[in-house]
Image: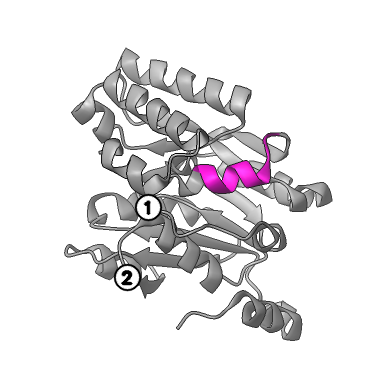
């Protein structure tokens, strides 16, 4: 059983010298094709971060790759909200970073994260990375502009942009909830628009779902699902439309 937030707090209080500055939580499900790139980018951090992979029952090489990379692997029922919540509870770092397995942080992320962490007021804020797709098509740039607008106007970065947050603030907000969908929007809305910072460094994520579902259809479906959620439709209903 993973440690509770209280147990983690007591552990930090008793032995601050052993506390990793940064814990990185990655939920996975059959992510063997992307996980290595995701983890490799995190090794640029100047100290050794605590790396936690929460696996939702993969039947490929995901778990083996995670362990070979030095990650602590936790087993979970599938569901990104539940996996993120479990990883956040198990993490012991002062700062928590949540990443999707198909996301690779672009060069330059370390200096921006370092500067953010060093500013005391940011302990009560959160940050996400600029959204970028791993596709050279003009349609990809259009999607990126749409996401940039959403972040600027609504203060709503999604989970594929990562999330950096101080542990105390995360626990104060109640952390991720075990939702079947919209777990990222749910948490960021509790952070609040004025307390969300977007880094210049990009989180490069897979464009597969856009190529597969359509460069217009996928963003419009995402927007429709977001509107339903904001209007109070339960995530368990929205997930049937999300696809």
Q: Quick check: 10 left or right of 2?
A: right
* Residue 14, above or below 101: below
Q: Residue visible at 49% across and 63% down?
A: 85
Q: Farthest residue in the left direction? A: 59
Of the image marks 2 and 1, the number of the one nearer the N terminus: 2
Of 119 and 186, nearer the camera is 186
The stretch drawn in magenta includes residue 126: no
Quarter of the rendering containing residue 171 = bottom right
**Image spot of residue 20 (x, y percent):** 62, 70
Q: In the picture shown, does residue 15 fall above or below 187? A: below
Residue at 49% across, 40% down: 161
State whether residue 39 is above or below residue 72: above
Q: Residue at x 36, y 24 (%)?
A: 219
Left or right: where 44 falls relative to 195: left
C-alpha gap between disc 2 and disc 1: 29 Å
189 falls in the magenta region: yes
**Which label is found at residue 180?**
1
Residue 58 in picture, x, y percent from top left: 22, 64
Vertically, is 242 above or below 51?
Answer: above
User: 241 or 90: nearer the eye?
Assistant: 241
What stretch of residues is rendered in magenta? 185-193
Q: Which residue is identified by label 2? A: 68
Observer able to see residue 111: no
Per the image, label 1 sits on a secondary structure element best described as loop
């Amino acid at each position: 059983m993973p440690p509770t937030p209280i147990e983690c707090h007591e552990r930090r209080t008793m032995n601050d010298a052993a506390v990793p500055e940064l814990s990185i939580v990655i939920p996975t499900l059959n992510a063997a094709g992307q996980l290595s790139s995701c983890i490799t980018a995190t090794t640029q951090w100047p100290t050794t971060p605590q790396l936690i992979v929460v696996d939702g029952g993969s039947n490929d090489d995901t778990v083996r790759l995670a362990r070979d990379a030095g990650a602590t692997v936790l087993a979970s029922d599938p569901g990104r909200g539940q996996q993120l919540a479990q990883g956040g509870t198990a993490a012991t770092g002062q700062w928590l970073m949540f990443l999707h397995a198909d996301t690779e942080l672009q060069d330059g992320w370390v200096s921006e994260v370092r500067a953010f962490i060093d500013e005391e007021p940011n302990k009560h804020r959160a940050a996400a990375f600029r959204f970028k797709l791993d596709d050279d098509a003009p349609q990809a740039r259009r999607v990126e502009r749409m996401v940039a607008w959403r972040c600027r106007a609504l203060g709503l970065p999604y989970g594929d942009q990562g999330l950096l947050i101080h542990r105390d603030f995360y626990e104060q907000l109640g952390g991720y909830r075990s939702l079947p969908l919209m777990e990222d929007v749910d948490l960021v809305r509790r952070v609040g628009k004025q307390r969300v910072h977007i880094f210049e460094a990009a989180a490069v994520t897979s464009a597969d779902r856009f190529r597969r579902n359509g460069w217009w259809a996928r963003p419009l479906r995402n927007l429709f699902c977001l509107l339903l959620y904001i209007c109070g439709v339960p995530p368990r209903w929205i997930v049937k439309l999300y696809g």
